[in-house]
Amino acid sequence: MPAVRALAGHALPKTPSARPQEAGPAPPSALTPAERAEVLALLNRPDYADLPPAQVWARELDEGRYHCSERTMYRILTAAGQNGERRRLATHPAKAVPQLLATAPGQVLTWDITKLQGPNKGEWYHAYVIIDIYSRYICGWTVERAESAERAEELIRETIARNGIVPETVHADRGTSMTSKKVSQLLIDLGVTRSHSRPKVSNDNPYSESHFKTMKYMGDFPGSFNSLADARDWCGGFFSYYNHEHRHSGIGLHTPASVHFGTADLVREQRAVTLAEAYTRHPERFARRPRPPRIPEHAWINEPKQETEAAQQSS
């Protein structure tokens, strides 16, 4: 206890501060400042400026010249603040976002190709599908054994001729058939604007992607098809159902055919009459007077955000 009391009245001795260490002599293997400057000048020569040190080191060695190790070259570059990417890299401008607006059927078509499993492992059929983005109507389709620019060009030509309307724009992704010279020349000849998705951006073609998901999630969609004829028969039945029976949530729960051929307004009027009669019979069953879903006035691929926000604020 006395010892503790004696220590309590005295501060503990301070640890002496470490003195800054003086730089020692450079090791015998170190380059002199002049030699380091020469190496840096070598690395920055026009014929070497784009090359990493390993390339410079090897090329100089092949010419019978040794300056220093490869690692030392890296250290010299680091000390000079030049340790980043030395190569001149190609710059690719960002692809423009496709922004397409349709306010009526026949204005904007989008198309894509999806694979269907054949009877044998590794055997696939290819379903080509053309969609009107405003009505969601399947304007043209085919199933083939292989993807072909020639068949794609034929299908687009046949579809436009059958519909009797030349669209303003045809949109697709960047597959080989979509960007082929045959398809491009056809659209140029018809005066149709060509539009393509950005590379590796799947949602630039949302209507085709959504349609293929609907198709492949059907309860009777087979895991594989026994033949090309089998695949064509199933797709023919599905596309007929989709166009004429399927009530699409994106178009006010109308069928694509009804919107495409202009009967949707009459159907909506009849729905309004039916709902009004139901409301008259039992108004207590409704929180408000029921109205049928509206038919959208436009369809977008990548609607501009500013317009979307403005519409939300004004609504």
Image (cartoon, helix red, strand yellow):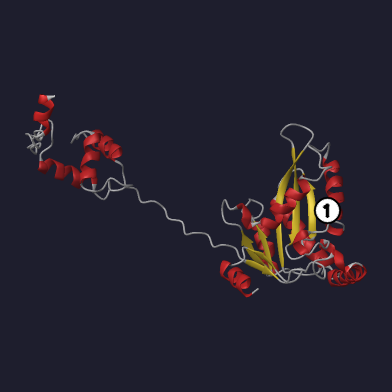
Q: Image quadrant for the C terminus?
A: bottom right
**Is residue 28 among the parts visible in the rendering?**
no
Query: Percent position (x, y) of residue 76?
Result: 20, 42
Residue 132, by quadrant, is bottom right
Residue ID at (84%, 56%): 246
Name the amino acid, label 1: Phe
Q: Is residue 49 above or below residue 10?
A: below
Q: Is residue 145 above or below residue 283?
A: above
Along the horizontal axis of the image, is 62 left or right of 117? left
**Is residue 222 among the parts visible in the rendering?**
yes
Question: Disc 1 designates what residue?
Answer: 239
Residue 270, by quadrant, is bottom right
Along the horizontal axis of the image, is 49 left or right of 315? left
Q: Is residue 217 above or below residue 72?
A: below
Q: Nearer the viewer, residue 291 or 169?
A: 291
Query: Percent position (x, y) of residue 95?
Result: 53, 59
Q: Is residue 110 above or below residue 221?
A: below
Query: Percent position (x, y) of residue 285?
Result: 86, 64
Q: Could you tell me which secondary element the residue under label 1 belongs to?
A: helix
Residue ID at (13%, 41%): 35
Residue ID at (83%, 36%): 226
Q: Image quadrant for the N terminus?
A: top left
Query: Percent position (x, y) of residue 141?
Result: 79, 54
Q: Nearer the viewer, residue 150 or 195?
A: 195
Along the horizontal axis of the image, is 149 left or right of 3? right
